[in-house]
Amino acid sequence: MPFQSTLQCFSLQSFPDHYRQGCELWERALESQKLPFTRLDFTLSPQDNLLCQTGWIGNLDAEAVLVVIGGTHGIEGFTGTAVQVDWMQMVANGLIALPDHTAMLMINALNPWGYANNRRCDDQGIDVNRNFIDFSQPLPINPGYEELQPLLGIRDRDARAKAIDGYCLRVGQRPYEIAFSGGQFNDPAGPFYGGQRPGFSRGVIESLIRHYSLANRYLAVVDVHTGLGPYGYGEVICDHPLGTDGLMTAIEWFGPGCGLPSTGKSSSVPKLGLLDYAWHQVMGPKSCFVTLEFGTMGTAALFDTLLDEASAWSSSECASSHSKAVVAEQMKAHFYPKDNHWREAVIFRARQVLHQALVGVS
Ligand SMILES: [Zn+2]
């Protein structure tokens, strides 16, 4: 049966099949704007034409800004592009009105290498969303990860699963998730590696904050992710510390369903080096940063997929090109389900959350 959407003005064409197409769709949506816009690209690799595209839509002097970020985790950028393209089309068609004093900053493919290579990390193996630590201080230690690391390296899938299950049973599910995904700085080939220095994507964010003097404006930042949480549901996750203005603002704008990792009320757990922290530092009152996380196949599948991926990319040259192609498909199946109903649910929820953010910040 052909797919029929229940949503108005919804097109599956907003969902790209590959990085290059994602860039073209995004560019077309930006250029269709009736409001003035400014394009600013950041090139990672000129020979591969890998770039992060950004567009400022509306008044350059706007006191409030809705910022939408996609592709922090490379492969999750497919959905990030679709959400931005759909939203920009809504604005261009007049279905969403941008108040005079409010602008939008769209950031597509923040980690272009990961996006183009179906990976979550960047070209240095860095998880961009663990890279925002103070590198002038000693690197943070994740003791749970150090204990887990030898188990994660077990090549045989069944033996590895058994060893990890044993660890999880011993320490409990939440400490296990913090150990695994909370961020680590000592295993460059492992998942959730925060790096030894600021990476390309961090540089992009810091440049944009300076270039547009974002510290002097009201901000609503929505960073689009996929792969964690219940299938098809978009959880708004807030990592502002308890008792802060940012957290109160997030609850005011997005409601009581806001996920709070610090209290255990979220599909996510507290993490080191989040992109959030760069924005928290420059935010004044009536501003907040949230992650919009679209669930797919669940946490166990996420961890398995990332371990298979890390193993394929660290294996010897001759075996690797085949296994890299296999894990690329596995990665896409986990982070970007080819299911029209999942994609429709993403757009429905993204419109809702971006509208809440826009109304809140304006
Ligand atoms: Zn992510």
Image (tube, rainbow, N blue to C red):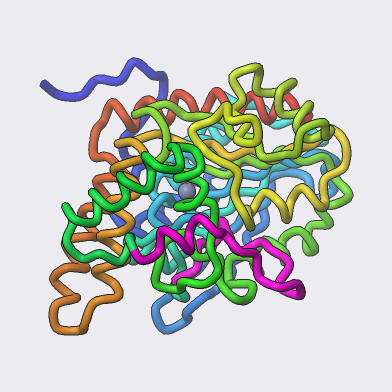
Q: Position of residue 167 (x, y in %)?
A: 37, 48
Is the N terminus in the top left, top right, bottom left or bottom right quadrant?
Answer: top left
| Residue displayed at 28% across by 53% down | 163
Q: Residue at x 56, y 71 (%)?
A: 195
Q: Does the magenta stretch include residue 144?
A: yes
Q: What stretch is highlighted in magenta?
A: 125-150
Residue 342 in magenta?
no
Q: Residue at x 57, y 48 (%)?
A: 69
Residue 58: x %, y % from top left: 72, 43
Residue 38: percent from left, percent from top: 67, 57
Residue 176 versus residue 306 in the image, above or below = above
Say how many tags the image has: 0
Residue 190 placed where, x, y %?
A: 40, 66
Occupied quadrant, residue 9:
top left
Q: Which of 32 and 99 is in front in this view?
A: 99
Which of these two is toward me, 52 or 303?
A: 303
Tell me if 269 is positioned left or right of 62 in this view: left
